[in-house]
Image (spheres, rainbow, N blue to C red):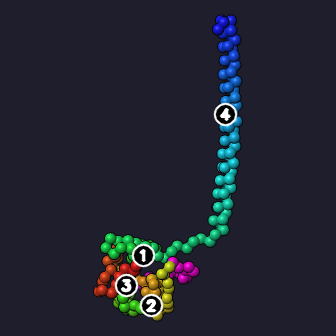
């Protein structure tokens, strides 16, 4: 190749590189702007969805706390507790919706009574009956529920099996 064309070739190569770089830069800038616009659109949609969700939640009635929960113990397995975690028991001498625990029995085995009005919706297996004294007592599968005075903290199951008639509710 003739040396007189070298400067022209160099200038041509530089011009080509500048053109390619300018095209790349223009496309990259355009792509970046497009991505920023799309991100802003998504953020706007997210903000609108959050606002709609908050408005919907504000219109819903507050969910009532369940009067029961579930506990687990390596000796007795899964069992029913009051909402505060205290173990609930059933008495084998009771019948459906009828308590046979009276007098001194109620001192050691306080009934699980409804506080206030009966919840409008109860979890499956949980019910309520009216005792002889007119109180409302919770039941599990129709059997009256009791606490045991010997349980001092949530998770205690000290009343299970007493006299062969008291058992954790399951």
Question: For the residue carrying disc 2, how many other residues have a C-alpha within 10 Å: few (<14), some (14-19), or many (20+)?
Answer: few
State the residue in front, 73 or 54: 73
Question: For the residue carrying disc 4, how many other residues have a C-alpha within 10 Å: few (<14), some (14-19), or many (20+)?
Answer: few
State the residue in front, 11 or 81: 11
Q: Give me the residue at 36% from left, 73% from top.
A: 77
Identify the mark nearer the N-term, 3 or 1. Answer: 1
Q: Give me the residue at 49% from left, 84% from top.
A: 127
Provide the residue designation for mark 3. 109
Confirm or deny contact between disc 3 and disc 1 (CB under 8 A). Answer: no
Provide the residue designation for mark 2. 96
Identify the mark nearer the N-term, 2 or 3. Answer: 2
Give the magenta range: 107-123
Provide the residue designation for mark 4. 28
Provide the residue designation for mark 1. 81
* In magenta segment, residue 113: yes
Furthest-left residue in this view: 163
Identify the mark nearer the N-term, 2 or 4. Answer: 4
Mark 2 to mark 4 CA distance (whole Å): 76 Å
């Amino acid at each position: 190749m003739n040396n007189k064309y070298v400067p022209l070739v160099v200038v041509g190569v530089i011009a080509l590189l500048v053109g390619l770089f300018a095209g790349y830069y223009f496309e990259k800038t355009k792509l970046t702007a497009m991505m920023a616009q799309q991100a802003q659109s998504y953020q706007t949609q997210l903000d609108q969805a959050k606002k709609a969700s908050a408005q919907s939640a504000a219109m819903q009635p507050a969910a009532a706390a369940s009067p029961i929960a579930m506990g687990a113990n390596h000796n007795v397995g899964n069992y029913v507790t009051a909402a505060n975690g205290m173990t609930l028991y059933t008495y084998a001498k009771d019948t459906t919706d009828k308590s046979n625990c009276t007098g001194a029995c109620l001192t050691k085995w306080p009934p699980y009574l409804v506080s206030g009005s009966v919840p409008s919706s109860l979890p499956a297996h949980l019910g309520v009956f009216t005792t002889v004294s007119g109180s409302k007592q919770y039941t599990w599968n129709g059997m009256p529920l009791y606490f045991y005075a010997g349980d001092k903290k949530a998770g205690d199951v000290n009343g299970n099996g007493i006299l062969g008639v008291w058992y954790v509710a399951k």
